[in-house]
């Protein structure tokens, strides 16, 4: 019952919010109440490892099968808790222009519904349907509530690019799912994980894995399929950017684990050199782009490409350590990206833009709270030991250095060396942002800073974080530190199920 309520509550609340005509005081209570109750139910579902399995479409053998395990538990909690943070953050400020507040909040809850259903689905067809639920509300967030400082054409272009790329990925993913279900005779993901590719030739496994990886790679996004991401992040409102980076991208990597690694392992092994190379190119490409990017939101978007490259490299290693590194890196990026987009979104709301070429007073002098949490996010982005991102990226490199026996060890070790170069690039662009935003033009090094500026007129200072918005970013910053010091809180949850998934023993009992 708790699992069913957890899925129905945000859905019904979203429908009610979208149905409210114009503005209404009730919208705030509905959105906040639904998100908080869903988060509490998520804790209950994860703690009790709840499952529901009943017939749905009998003629096709599709079941209404949802359940939580060690692979999805952290993602369910991340989605539910971040939705509360997004709603609180939104209600503490102003609803972006472009539509009613009830529609905006309804779209947020619809995205949560689709994401939770995706992470809980235990049927491949049900997984695909849940995956697609988030498409329309995210398009609305970008198209209707996007940055009101840009033209309508730019909002349309960003939203249209998001839809076109993701629909293409969905089409490829659906074809791969249908091939897999047809040849295995079941759409049950638990049974497909237990079969572990038995009864399918290696060439067919490779073809199915290729289609699924290509479709899901667009969602991750994997280089060079990432070109839709920077524009979507730049135009999206803060809530949209947080959900896109912290939840929607995770659906892609989770899909690779659940749909590909677990069901067609030989196909993944065959394609692992390609995965490793593309992952490392993404690490280097994203890092180099961040070194020259002038828009702070686009910079964080390119850093996402780099961080997800480490996740893909870990998956290419083929070991249970690599799988755990990918799962931990997934969660780490979600938390850190959410922190950065919350802070940068608030700053952009005050400044009117996130252009690094505009000279501004340093946050350390005028908005130290914003400055400190920004530094925590940047330190985590560069993989500083003691913060959550370090463990995912370190374990990814460790796993790739000692890959599974059926993976090319020499190639993987070359990728590890190049990935280490990517860490150096992450340090360089993180320090660049800290120099420009934390120190600003009021620092003693202003002469060096202005070399990057087109406009050397120093703008007014930002107003520091306070109230509910300060509570949101402070809580996330504390999570970055606590999970960096105690990574076993996440590794202990995913460890046993990661081993069973890699070996083909299945996950759910």
Image (spheres, rainbow, N blue to C red):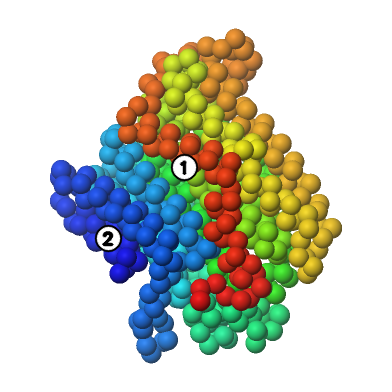
Q: Is residue 461 above or below residue 33?
A: above
Mark 2 residue element: helix
Q: Residue furthest right?
A: 410
* Residue at 35 percent of width and 27 percent of height: 466
> In the depicted view, which residue is nearer to us: 455 or 400?
400
Identify the residue at image location x=60%, y=82%. Answer: 195
Q: Can I make out residue 389 in this image?
A: yes
- In which quadrant is the N terminus drawn? bottom left
User: Which residue sits at x=38%, y=53%?
Assistant: 80
Total label count? 2
- The quarter of the picture where residue 495 lies is bottom right
Pinpoint residue 56: horizontal percent, then vertical percent: 35, 81
Q: Which residue is mark 1?
A: 338
Mark identifier at residue 140: none
Counting from the top left corner in percent of width and height, residue 294 is at 55, 31
Looking at the image, which residue is at 69% across and 36% down?
425
How far across and how far down the image is residue 393, in percent?
66, 47
Q: Which mark is residue 9?
A: 2
Q: Secondary structure at mark 1?
A: helix
Relative to 144, is 355 on the left or the right?
A: right
Q: Nearer the viewer, mark 2 or mark 1?
A: 2
Mark earlier in primary sequence (2, 1): 2
> Left or right of 433: which side holds 47?
left
- The CA span between labels 2 and 1 is 24 Å
- Splitting the image into 4 quarters, where does residue 256 fall? bottom right
């Amino acid at each position: 019952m708790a699992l069913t309520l957890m899925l129905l509550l945000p859905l019904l609340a979203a429908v009610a919010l979208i149905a409210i005509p114009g503005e209404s005081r009730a919208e705030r209570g509905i959105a906040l109440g639904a998100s908080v109750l869903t988060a509490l139910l998520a804790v209950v579902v994860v703690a009790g490892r709840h499952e529901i399995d009943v017939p749905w479409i009998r003629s096709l053998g599709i079941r209404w099968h949802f359940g939580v395990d060690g692979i999805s538990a952290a993602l369910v909690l991340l989605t539910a808790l971040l939705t509360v943070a997004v709603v609180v953050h939104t209600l503490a400020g102003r609803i972006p222009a472009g539509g009613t507040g009830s529609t905006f909040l309804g779209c947020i809850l619809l995205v949560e519904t689709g994401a939770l259903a995706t992470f809980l689905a235990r049927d491949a067809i049900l997984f695909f349907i849940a995956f697609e639920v988030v498409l329309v509300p995210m398009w609305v967030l970008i198209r209707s509530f996007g940055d009101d400082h840009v033209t309508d054409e730019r909002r349309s272009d960003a939203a249209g690019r998001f839809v076109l790329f993701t629909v293409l990925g969905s089409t490829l993913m659906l074809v791969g799912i249908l091939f897999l279900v047809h040849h295995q005779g079941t759409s049950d993901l638990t049974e497909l994980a237990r079969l572990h590719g038995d009864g399918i030739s290696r060439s067919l496994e490779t073809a199915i894995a290729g289609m699924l990886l290509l479709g899901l790679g667009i969602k991750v996004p994997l280089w060079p399929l990432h070109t839709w991401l920077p524009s979507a992040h730049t135009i999206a409102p803060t809530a949209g950017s947080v959900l896109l980076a912290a939840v929607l991208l995770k659906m892609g990597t989770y899909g690779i684990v659940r749909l590909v690694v677990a069901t067609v392992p030989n196909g993944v092994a065959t394609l692992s050199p390609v995965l490793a190379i593309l992952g490392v190119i993404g690490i280097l490409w994203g890092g180099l782009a961040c070194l020259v990017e002038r828009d702070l939101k686009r910079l964080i978007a390119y850093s996402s490409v780099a961080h997800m490259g480490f996740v893909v490299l870990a998956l290419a290693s083929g070991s249970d350590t690599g799988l755990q590194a990918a799962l931990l890196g997934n969660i780490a990026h979600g938390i850190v990206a959410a922190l950065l987009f919350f802070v940068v979104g608030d700053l952009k709301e005050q400044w009117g833009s996130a252009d690094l070429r505009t000279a501004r007073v340093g946050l350390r002098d005028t908005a130290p709270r914003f400055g400190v949490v920004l530094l925590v996010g940047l330190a985590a982005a560069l993989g500083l030991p003691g913060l959550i991102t370090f463990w995912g990226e370190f374990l990814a490199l460790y796993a790739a250095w000692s890959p599974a026996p059926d993976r090319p060890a020499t190639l993987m070790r070359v990728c590890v060396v190049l990935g280490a170069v990517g860490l150096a690039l992450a340090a360089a662009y993180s320090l660049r942002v800290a120099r420009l935003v934390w120190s600003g033009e009021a620092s003693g090094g202003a002469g060096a800073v202005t070399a990057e500026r087109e406009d050397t007129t120093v703008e007014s200072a930002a107003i520091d974080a306070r109230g509910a918005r300060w509570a949101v970013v402070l809580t996330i910053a504390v999570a970055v530190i606590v999970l960096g010091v105690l990574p076993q809180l996440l590794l202990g949850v995913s460890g046993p199920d990661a081993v069973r998934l890699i070996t083909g023993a299945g996950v759910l009992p």
